[in-house]
Amino acid sequence: MKMMRMINLVRGSVMKIHGLSRASRCLAAEGGVRGLSSSSGPRVCIVGGGPAGFYTAQQLLKARQDAAVDVYERLPVPFGLVRFGVAPDHPEVKNVINTFTQTAQHERCSFHGNVNVGKDVTIDELRQAYHAVVLSYGAEGNRSMGISGEDLPGVFSAKDFVGWYNGLPSNKELRPDLSCETAVILGQGNVALDVARILLAPVEMLKETDITQNALEALAGSKVRRVLIVGRRGPLQIACTIKELREMVNLPNTRADMLPADFEGIAEALKDLPRPRKRLTELMMKAAKEGGDDKAEKCWGFRFFRSPVEVIAGADGKRATGIRLALNKLEGSGESARAEVTGQLEDVDCGLIISSIGYKSIPIDPAVPFDPRRAIVPNEMGRVQDTAGLYCSGWVKRGPTGVIATTMNDSFDTARVLIQDMEAGKLDLSVNKPGAQAITALLQTRGVRTVLFSQWEKITAEEEKRGKSLGKPREKPLDVDEMLKIA
């Protein structure tokens, strides 16, 4: 006990966070947090428990044998978009969770779920408790289409729709009306194709995935038979990859429905295309030409050179019944081609409209610089602008682009820059920082119940147990309070 009191006295003398010295003593008396001894090595805090956060942590732990890393996540459960964004019929993409689990279980790493940074604890409080803070909280905002009627019932963002079928607690009340025959998806990236595939896939294919049971039941009763995937530019600028397109082409009981006019002049351009773009375009043209099984009950198709102008409401004005599109022409060529409106309009009848035009990051705390136009934290190679000791990685650093491997490389880059700053003396490592001992105790005084990784393991075990009874890998609880009760 004498030694513990001495440690607390020393800690109290070096801490600068108002009110935290008493809080840290409380936690020390309770035994502290796994992996965080009284080591005087660098303490790093990561905000966000998704791919960017875990990849940054992995690289830091590997590069500095004396570093202690704490990951704070708003939800009680880790893994971010790998858990809530990857399509349920793509389980192989989720295998990266095994790597993240190894990182979370590292003796110098701690996970703290159910902590809303910016609300439960401020960035300034974290900066005073840690030598460095890395923002890796992703992009949870929706990009607006900026057209009239986009707030009508029947119009959803792809982010929310994906969250609904993947069990994101904030989307559990979505309840999309699937009683219409035609759905229109705006945007032609991989997420748009994921949504189209889930809408048209046989329920038998989805039954053995980790799609939520309520989404599965809604899709089983769906009347959607036709999905149009709309883009403002042409076939040579489409943003999806060949894997996702091939899955659409091979989807059982569906056929492709394209407009021949959209492909005029494309065959002549093939010889000059880079190989990945050429293969993608050839597959698209083959699907457009052959169509598929004439007896298929469902169909899908790309619609190119079209931009949304207005969501059309029904006679009662209470819900979406169609969308008005502007017809475009391209100025320029290749990736840099711009869509210019022609003045012509086209109306499409549909009862479900899903906007897949991109996610965006949102400001987390007034103390953090933010570029509202680009929707990122302004930074240079991951160093947050004009804020020493503050870094960023992933989508909040560069915008919501790329795949998980892109985020991995980006996060490794940020970690390397942080390590360079430590070794160059840009971060004062001579000051002993309290890290999670202080922050966790502060959260306790504020009535915030944190979820450690060992408690998350109780949640995942319960999910697997529930899934087993349904013949699925897991069945996710949709309610945060339920997650906390299981934990």
Image (cartoon, helix red, strand yellow):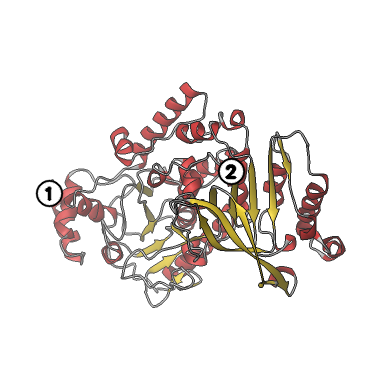
Q: Is residue 138 visible?
A: no
- Sequence-first tag of 2 and 1: 1
Query: Which residue, given by chain and number where applicable, does mark 2 sit on?
Result: 93
Between 381 and 301, the one lying in front of the other is 301
Q: Nearer the viewer, residue 204 or 230?
A: 230
Give the quadrant of residue 452: top left
The reply to whether discs 2 and 1 touch (Cβ–Cβ < 8 Å) is no
**Residue at figure coordinates x 41%, y 42% from the top left:** 105
* Quarter of the rendering occupied by the C terminus: top left
Residue 261 in the image: x percent, y percent? 79, 59
Q: Residue furthest front?
A: 315
Amino acid type indicated by mark 2: Val
Q: Residues within 10 Å of mark 2 (few under 14, many from 20)?
A: few
Q: Is residue 219 above or below residue 466?
A: below
Circle on res. 2: 1
Badge 1 crowding class, 10 Å Cα cut-off, few under 14, some 14 to 19, many 20 or more, is few
Residue 327 on image: x %, y %: 67, 66
Viewer-proximal residue, 144 or 245? 144
Q: Which mark is residue 220?
A: none
Residue found at the far bottom of this picture: 386
Q: Is residue 189 left or right of residue 256?
A: left
In x, y percent, where is residue 165? 49, 40
| Of 335 and 188, the residue lying toward us | 188
Q: Is residue 112 above or below residue 64?
A: above
- Amino acid type, residue under disc 1 in the picture: Lys
Q: Determine which quarter of the picture holds residue 388.
A: bottom left
